[in-house]
Image (cartoon, rainbow, N blue to C red):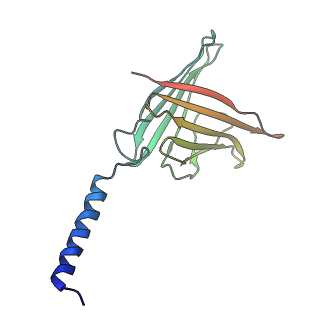
Amino acid sequence: MGNPTAIRIFGVCATLVMLACVLSAQAPANSANPTNPRFARWKLKSTAAAPSSNIMTYEPFNGTGMKVTIESVNASGTKSQWGYTTMFDGKDEPVTGRNGTATGSVRVITEQINEIIYKDADGKIVQVLMNVLSPDGKTITVSYTSANAQGLQKPTYATYEKMQ
């Protein structure tokens, strides 16, 4: 058998090392960390001359989640606002203010990538988004794949810039 004092010292040291690792670990990007780089207002980057805009606002929600609000103005000047909350757990949450969409779910793929799925009132998927945060935290690129009776459509893409 080994020296009981040495075994105790080794155990205490191992415990302290593990505790130090836990305490120094960086929180994931989608946690309650107030420095989450997604928590901001994001404006659609557009080169089109049409007078439309789209602003996404991501705010902390309920400790570990996020409140999402989308404000937009279409080319004819009509304003709209819609949103939902998420706990990043892939569970469907109610969406308010968006025609044809009853729920939204967000699942973390990596610290930079979130998968978002919108469903209609019958639970059918109407749109799948891949929301990708740039390494520098200054842009979000979103691929939108919509679904209709014929199936999934060709994706479209948009880039959002963090507002100062």
Q: Is residue 126 left or right of residue 73?
A: right
Q: Is residue 78 above or below residue 125?
A: above
Q: What residue appears at the point 49 percent right and 24 percent down from the top-left corner?
A: 161
Is residue 45 visible to the viewer in this orientation of the structure?
yes
Pinpoint residue 112: horizontal percent, then vertical percent. 50, 41
Tell me: 36 left or right of 78: left
Q: Position of residue 15 (x, y in %)?
A: 25, 69
Nearer-the-camera pick, 41 or 84 = 41
From the viewer's perspective, is residue 52 above or below residue 149? above
Q: Is residue 98 visible?
A: no
Between residue 113 and residue 126, name the one nearer to us.
113
Pick the residue in front: 127 or 7. 7
Furthest residue to the left? 5
State which quarter of the image contains the N terminus: bottom left
Find the residue positioned furthest to the right. Answer: 150
Residue reaching furthest top? Answer: 49
When asked about the image quadrant of residue 16, the answer is: bottom left
Residue plotted at (40% across, 40% down): 60
Count the labels in the image: 0
